[in-house]
Amino acid sequence: MLDSEDLKGAAILIYANKQDLPDAMNAAEITEKMSLTEIKDREWHIQVDIAVYFNNNLIFRFKRDAARRKAQGYKKDWIG
């Protein structure tokens, strides 16, 4: 898919929801499993999140906790 001429240069967003589950892969694990560091021709980003419902509204709680991000092995919001 990344070789498609229509997507040439398009940024990649990996949305990693369900980060509250015990077996959820962290950003460093996703990076390794998907070989993202090998992608050199475009920017990529992993957005870790927990989506919850409150009063029948879907709310996204982006992980911004620096200690947890550091423990998960990534250093900044934009990884690629």
Image: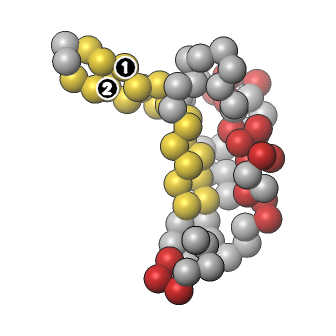
Q: Which mark is residue 4?
A: none
Q: Nearer the viewer, residue 52 or 45?
A: 52
Disc 2 residue type? Answer: Ile
Look at 65% across and 25% down and name the residue there: 24
Residue of label 2: 59
Q: Secondary structure at mark 2?
A: strand
The image quadrant where one finds the N terminus is bottom right
Look at 26% across and 14% down and name the residue there: 54
Q: Is residue 21 above or below residue 13?
A: above
User: Which residue appears farthest toward the bottom when viewing the image?
Assistant: 5
Q: Earlier in the sequence, mark 2 or mark 1?
A: 1
- Residue 3 location (% of width, % of height): 62, 79
Q: Is residue 75 visible?
A: no
* Figure colour scheme: secondary structure
**Separation (CA) of disc 2 from disc 1:** 5 Å
Q: Which mark is residue 52?
A: 1
User: Which residue appears farthest toward the front when viewing the image?
Assistant: 1
Look at 76% across and 24% down and name the residue there: 71
Classify 10 Å Cα crowding around label 1: few (below 14), some (14-19), many (20 and above).
Answer: few
Disc 1 residue type? Answer: Val
Q: Are marks 2 and 1 in contact (CB under 8 Å)?
A: yes
Look at 57% across and 24% down and name the residue there: 19
